[in-house]
Amino acid sequence: MLDVERWAELRREHFVRGVSINELVRRTGLARNTVRAALRSDAPPRYERRARPSKLDPFKDEIHRLLGKDPRLSGVRVRELIEPLGFAGGKTVVDDYLREVRPVFLRPRTHQRTIYRPGEICQWDLWEPSGPVPVGHGQVRRGWVVVACLGYSRAGAGALIFSKEAPDVLWGMGRCVWSLGALPELMVWDREGCLHAGGGRPTEPYAAFCGRLPVDWRFCEPADPQAKGAVERLQGYLETNFEPGRSFANHLDFQLQLDMWFEKANARTHRTLRCRPIDRLVEELEVMRPLPARELDLDRRWVTRVAPDPHLRFDTNDYSLDPNLVGRRVEVRVSQREITAVALDTGELACRHERVFAKHRTVTALEHARALRQRHGERASSRDVVVEQRSLEVYDQLIA
């Protein structure tokens, strides 16, 4: 049988260059009938192998029945169910057939292209860097980045956090919103545990956050990343273009480099939009509602009493308190950058420390250490006992 190249060569020589059939037979050594057949055929030669029966043929009806009950049945489970019936084939033949017939039993899903109005929507997600982030004191820590993406302009922003608790995630959202410069109408999240209370309802902290701005909220259905495809694509771009080839001195350096990267990313030409997100953002900001006059207070707060060991513990770290306030109640306030405490009765400052993200550290202010040393010195001097001294002449008289 001729291959396609030889067939095309024969037709070229005869029809283009005018070579006769006799000459073609002489040159190629092919039979005359073979040459004639090649010249008469308008379609290239094709080898067709006769279909051989498959080991799976006797079991296809049973596979159809199983898929009718559960279209997502795995190939491993299908093999387990048909092997007792006599199937002796391998994994590949089952998986290939399932790949072919499964769409018949699954309801096909279609997607429509979405067009966003300016200021309509902001999509959110949490991205985890591939490695831990340096936090000082020779330590590293697992971190996440709250990623925001406006639907119309595709402008993005990000904020580094070190837990998935509501105060940290909401702080990251607030930082992103203030970086973008205005309020969208709708916030779209997947079902993040600290934000979603179940049934499409927000948790109390998230509802308070949205109510104070105010903005609307929406949660995607489970396993539906396409519902927030804009931020998913931005996150994919972040993974492949931000981390590779970078090193970070600490978490502050990470956030600084992240902010600079988003400035550059927002100024690039977007492949889908065919324009720069920063240019579209200018148009979008004109219709978005302005930000509140002040940033939202999202700090952690609680009241405690200053213990005899004047320290408070947060996130495995101990922070010193003013020892002169031992026994009094103070209000503790923890932000992403510092930890403060104030006496409730007088308003005296009990402490102000830079927040440490390393673990198991003791942070002591110099003035607290001096005050504690002074108090211990006064207590020691107050415990000095005056011992009466007896004249030695009394003992001399007794001995005599």
Image (tube, rainbow, N blue to C red):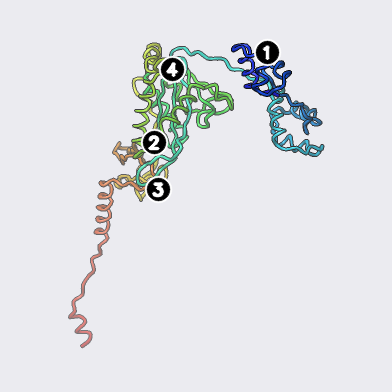
The percent coordinates of residue 113 (x first, y second) are 54, 14
Q: Considering only vertical position in the picture, is 316 above or below 192?
A: below
Which residue corresponds to mark 2?
245
Q: How far is disc 2 from disc 4 in space, using C-alphas?
A: 34 Å
Rendered residue at 62%/19% (across/down): 9
Q: Are marks 3 and 4 in contact (CB under 8 Å)?
A: no
Q: How far is disc 2 from disc 1 in space, using C-alphas?
A: 57 Å
Dot 1 amino acid type: Asp
Which residue corresponds to mark 3?
360
Q: Quadrant of residue 337?
A: top left
The crowding category of the residue bearing disc 4, from other C-alpha atoms within 10 Å (few below 14, some 14 to 19, many at least 20), is: many
Q: Considering only vertical position in the picture, is 129 above or below 186?
A: below
Q: Nearer the viewer, residue 306 or 93?
A: 93
Q: How far is disc 3 from disc 4 in space, using C-alphas?
A: 40 Å
The crowding category of the residue bearing disc 1, from other C-alpha atoms within 10 Å (few below 14, some 14 to 19, many at least 20), is: few
Q: Earlier in the sequence, mark 2 or mark 1?
A: 1
Q: Nearer the viewer, residue 368 or 171?
A: 171
Q: Earlier in the sequence, mark 1 or mark 4?
A: 1
Q: How far is disc 2 from disc 3 in space, using C-alphas?
A: 30 Å
Q: Earlier in the sequence, mark 3 or mark 4?
A: 4
The percent coordinates of residue 156 (x first, y second) are 41, 23
Q: Which quarter of the rendered picture does the C terminus lie within?
A: bottom left
Q: Earlier in the sequence, mark 2 or mark 3?
A: 2
Q: Earlier in the sequence, mark 1 or mark 3?
A: 1
Dot 3 amino acid type: His
Q: Earlier in the sequence, mark 2 or mark 4?
A: 4
Dot 2 amino acid type: Gly
